Amino acid sequence: MNRSTNPFGSQQSVIWNQDRQLLQIADAAFADAASRSGPHLVCRPGCTQCCHGAFAINALDAQRLRQGIAELSSAAPEKAAMIRARADLYWNEFGPSFPGDTTTGILGETEEAQEAFEEFANEAACPALNPESGLCELYEYRPMTCRVFGPPVRSQAEPGESEQPEEGLAICELCFTTANSEEIIAAEMQVPHAEEAALLNQLGQPGETIIAWCLKSSD
């Protein structure tokens, strides 16, 4: 990622450098998993199923997105304006039902809020998605969830729930449709969860938000 400034502030340059290293680790892990997936990983430019539906992003993801839209505003202001316009439309439609603080954009942590988020904007396109090209216009700044989506990724089963058939591995429903269990397990992506958690702890910014909140026009 070629980013000229530090979105985390001058006092947190160490976190900034570690964040870049984190993304390098994640991208290398994806490339490795992709090489082991063979033809079963069908992710490609223009496939946008994973670009629809809201999901939570953490403070690191949010800062990267803000940096991305800020840099795009300088380099390609018309493109950045279109992204913000899509984010504004998204928020105007779904903001009233946002299960969290509409002032800060932070998602609620109560059981009721979490249940509401499961039904929130499930079919809405991400504002960073170009509806004509089917490409992400902030690809280099995309959240970790976007970076690891596709290959088999190990998920944590909730207490009292059974794990998924292939040893608790979550997979894009469009991928590995003809793979057997052994092929799925062999292609598992090693996500740097521990490294990400350590950075979030250093950042000291609790609370999750959504992509649209980060990209909409400032009030």
Image: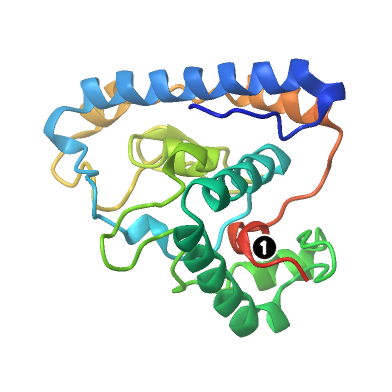
Q: Position of residue 213 (x, y in %)?
A: 67, 63
Q: Position of residue 204 (x, y in %)?
A: 86, 33
Q: Position of residue 74 (x, y in %)?
A: 56, 48
Give the image quarter of residue 88. Answer: bottom right
Q: Is residue 92 above or below residue 178?
A: below
Residue at image mark 1: 213
Q: Residues within 10 Å of mark 1 (few under 14, many from 20)?
A: many
Residue 127 shows up from this direction: no
Q: Residue at x 21, y 41 (%)?
A: 176
Q: Residue at x 26, y 27 (%)?
A: 34
Coloring applied to the structure: rainbow
Q: If the image is split into quadrants, where does the C terminus sit?
A: bottom right
Determine whether the residue tagged by mark 1 lies in a helix, strand or loop: helix
Q: Is residue 30 above or below residue 110?
A: above
Q: 168 left or right of 213?
A: left
Label total for image: 1
Q: 41 left or right of 192?
A: left
Q: Residue at x 23, y 21 (%)?
A: 36
Give the image quarter of residue 182. Answer: top left
Q: Residue at x 57, y 57 (%)?
A: 55
Q: Position of residue 147 (x, y in %)?
A: 44, 37
Residue closest to the eye, 6 or 94: 6
Residue 4 shows up from this direction: yes
Residue closest to the eye, 111 or 158: 111
Q: Name the amino acid, label 1.
A: Trp
Q: Is residue 165 above or below residue 54?
A: above
